[in-house]
Amino acid sequence: MPKTIMTVDDSSSVRQMVRFTLTEEGYQVIEASNGQEALAKMDAGVDMVITDLNMPIMNGIELIREIRKRSDSCRFIPIIMLTTESQNEKKMEGKAAGATGWIVKPFRPDQLLSVVKKVLP
């Protein structure tokens, strides 16, 4: 059974690029445009989350904190931040919230796949 990855970004073009990259490798993809929408879709059985930092309604850091508070099944899933932010303070804030890794946009598809394969065996 293919692994399911949720991509969370307020940019539909970024979600489309991530979806295309992942589905080409056989992953199933669920999309959300903000953290609140992502939380509502978490019960669909997600193996990994790739989220932007800066989004309306609920940002990526808040999303990570909420996911980590949920049941054991969600507490340990890999969460990758995919964002334009590259400041060390933001990376540390993401790590403290529970982010597994950090990729700076714009990203290369091979770079994204490399990280996914590393954290989602």
Image (cartoon, rainbow, N blue to C red):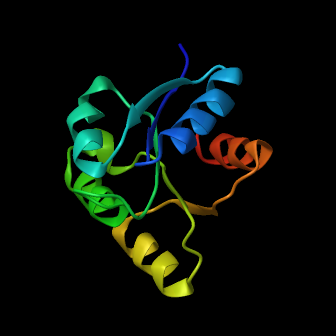
Residue 10: percent from left, percent from top:
40, 48
Residue 59 vertical placement versus 91 (above, below): above
The residue shown at (25%, 58%) is 58
The image quadrant where one finds the C terminus is top right
Residue 33 lies in quadrant: top left
| Residue 121 shows up from this direction | no
> Going by the image, does 2 lie left or right of 116?
left
Residue 75 vertical placement versus 60 (above, below): above
> Going by the image, does 54 lie left or right of 102?
left
Residue closest to the eye, 115 or 8: 8
Residue 70: percent from left, percent from top:
20, 48
The residue shown at (41%, 33%) is 31
- Give the residue at the far top of this rendering: 1
The residue shown at (44%, 34%) is 47
Residue 113 vertical placement versus 57 (above, below): above
> Going by the image, does 114 lie left or right of 79?
right
| Residue 6 shows up from this direction | yes
Residue 41 lies in quadrant: top left
Residue 81: percent from left, percent from top:
51, 59
Residue closest to the eye, 61 or 11: 11
State the count of labels: 0
> Going by the image, does 26 lie left or right of 41?
right
The residue shown at (58%, 63%) is 102
